[in-house]
Image (tube, rainbow, N blue to C red):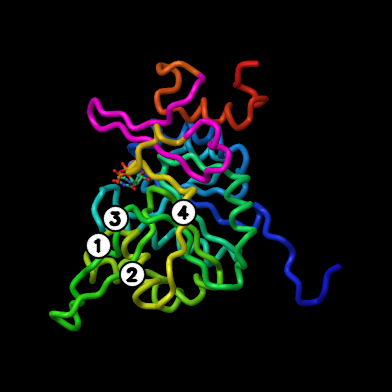
C-alpha cells in the first residue's frame, strides 16, 4: 500500500550518470562503453568532454557535452569538468548523481540495486577510498593546524544523493567547486571529499563493490563479477591491469570489457552463442 509520504522505489531513471572524458580518449575509450553498458542506460548517461565531436555526439545519441574546460590533465581542468558534471546534475532534478571515468565499466543493474538501499532524501556520499587512512592536509586558514578527511576515488566511481547535492549547492555550484579545488590545490575527487567531509561534516560511506585500476583487477573472481558495481583497467607501458576472465581474445578485447559484458549478459547481440 502507498501512503502520501511513501516514496516510490528508485529506478534507473532517477540516476544522473556522468562519465568524464577528453578529446584524446573518445576514439580509444568510448567505443567499448557505447557498445556495452551504455546500451543499458542510454537516456541516463552523459559524457562530459572538452571539445565538439560530431562522430561521438552521434554515437552517444547526443549525450556528449562539451564543458568548454581545457583539454589538459591539470587540476583546474579536471575540477572544471567535475563542476560542470555537478551543476548539470543539479539542473537534472534526478535523485542521484553518479560520476565515473571513461575507463570504468558500470554494472548498471547492480548500481540501481545499491542505490535502492539508500534513501535519496538523506545525505549520502557513496564510494571507495584508495588510501588506508584519511587524507591529512594543512589547514591554510589555521596554520599550522591540519585537517583530515576521506574521499572517494574518482576512478572507482562515486554517487551523491540529491539531498547532499542540495546542501553542497551554495558551496560548490556555479564555478565555486573550481575555486575550492584551487584553494586546497588538490584534484577533483579530493575536492569532492573535502567539501562533503570537511565543509559539510558528512561522511563517506564505503561501497566495496566500486573498483578503480588502483586495485589489481585480476583478483576479482569470475564468480563474483555480477555483484560488483564498477570495474576498470590500466595500461602503463608494458604493465596491464585488467580483469582476468574467459571470453574474447586479447586482440579483440585487450581491456576485457567485452568479455565482462558477455559474462553478465550471455545473450547480448555480439556475444558468442
Ligand atoms: N581526463 C581528462 N582530461 C585529461 C586527461 C584525463 O578529462 O587531460 C579524464 C579521463 O578521460 C578519465 C580521467 O580523467 O576519465 C582519468 O584519466 P586517466 O584514466 O587517463 O588517468 P588516471 O588518473 O586514472 O591515471
Ligand atoms: Mn584511469
Q: Quadrant of the C terminus?
A: top right
Question: Relative to 29, is 158 above or below?
Answer: below
Residue 161 image-quadrant placement? bottom right
Which residue is depicted at the point 29% across and 47% down? 71
Residue 82 image-quadrant placement? bottom left
Question: Relative to 199, is 42 above or below?
Answer: above
Mark 2 touching mark 4, by CB under 8 A?
no
Instruction: For marks 1 and 2, give the CA distance.
Output: 9 Å
Q: Nearer the viewer, residue 235 or 227?
A: 227
Q: Residue furthest right?
A: 1
Q: Earlier in the sequence, mark 1 or mark 3?
A: 3
Q: Is 224 covered by the magenta stretch?
A: yes
Mark 1 touching mark 4, by CB under 8 A?
no
Residue 142 image-quadrant placement? bottom left
Q: Earlier in the sequence, mark 1 or mark 2?
A: 1
Q: Quadrant of ligand 1?
A: top left
**Image-based side of 116 in relation to 138, left or right:** right
Which residue matches tag 1?
Answer: 186
Which residue matches tag 4?
Answer: 99
Q: How many marks?
A: 4
Instruction: For marks 2 and 4, give the CA distance.
Output: 16 Å
Which residue matches tag 2?
Answer: 194
Which residue is depicted at the point 64% across and 25% down? 266
Which residue matches tag 3?
Answer: 77
Q: Nearer the viewer, residue 57 or 31?
A: 31
Mark 3 touching mark 4, by CB under 8 A?
no
Dot 4: few (<14), some (14–19), or many (≥20) neighbours within 10 Å? many
Look at the image and give the residue range highlighted in magenta. Answer: 221-247
Mark 1 touching mark 2, by CB under 8 A?
yes
Residue 74 point in image, percent of width and height: 24, 53
Ligand 1 within 8 Å of the CB at mark 1: no
Give SS at disc 3: helix
Amino acid at each position: 500500500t502507498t501512503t502520501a509520504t511513501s516514496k516510490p522505489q528508485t529506478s534507473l531513471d532517477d540516476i544522473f550518470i556522468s562519465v568524464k572524458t577528453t578529446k584524446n580518449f573518445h576514439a580509444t575509450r568510448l567505443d567499448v562503453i557505447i557498445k556495452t553498458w551504455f546500451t543499458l542506460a542510454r537516456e541516463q548517461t552523459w559524457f562530459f568532454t572538452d571539445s565538439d565531436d560530431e562522430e561521438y555526439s552521434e554515437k552517444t545519441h547526443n549525450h556528449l557535452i562539451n564543458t568548454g574546460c581545457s583539454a589538459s590533465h591539470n587540476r583546474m581542468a579536471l575540477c572544471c569538468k567535475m563542476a560542470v558534471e555537478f551543476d548539470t546534475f543539479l539542473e537534472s532534478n534526478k535523485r542521484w548523481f553518479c560520476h565515473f571515468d571513461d575507463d570504468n565499466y558500470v554494472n548498471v543493474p547492480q548500481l540501481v540495486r545499491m542505490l535502492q538501499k539508500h534513501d535519496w532524501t538523506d545525505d549520502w556520499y557513496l564510494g571507495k577510498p584508495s588510501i588506508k587512512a584519511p587524507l591529512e592536509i594543512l589547514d591554510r586558514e589555521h596554520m599550522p593546524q591540519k585537517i583530515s578527511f576521506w574521499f572517494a576515488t574518482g576512478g572507482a566511481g562515486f554517487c551523491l544523493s540529491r539531498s547532499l547535492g542540495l546542501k553542497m549547492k551554495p558551496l560548490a555550484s556555479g564555478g565555486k567547486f573550481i575555486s575550492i579545488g584551487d584553494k586546497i590545490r588538490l584534484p577533483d575527487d579530493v575536492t569532492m571529499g573535502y567539501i562533503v567531509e570537511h565543509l559539510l561534516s558528512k561522511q563517506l560511506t564505503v561501497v566495496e563493490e566500486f573498483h578503480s585500476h588502483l586495485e589489481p583487477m585480476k583478483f576479482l573472481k569470475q564468480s563474483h563479477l555480477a555483484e560488483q558495481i564498477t570495474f576498470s583497467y590500466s595500461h602503463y607501458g608494458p604493465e596491464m591491469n585488467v580483469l582476468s576472465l574467459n571470453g574474447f581474445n586479447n586482440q579483440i578485447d585487450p581491456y576485457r570489457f567485452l568479455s565482462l559484458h558477455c559474462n553478465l549478459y550471455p545473450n547480448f547481440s555480439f556475444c558468442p552463442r
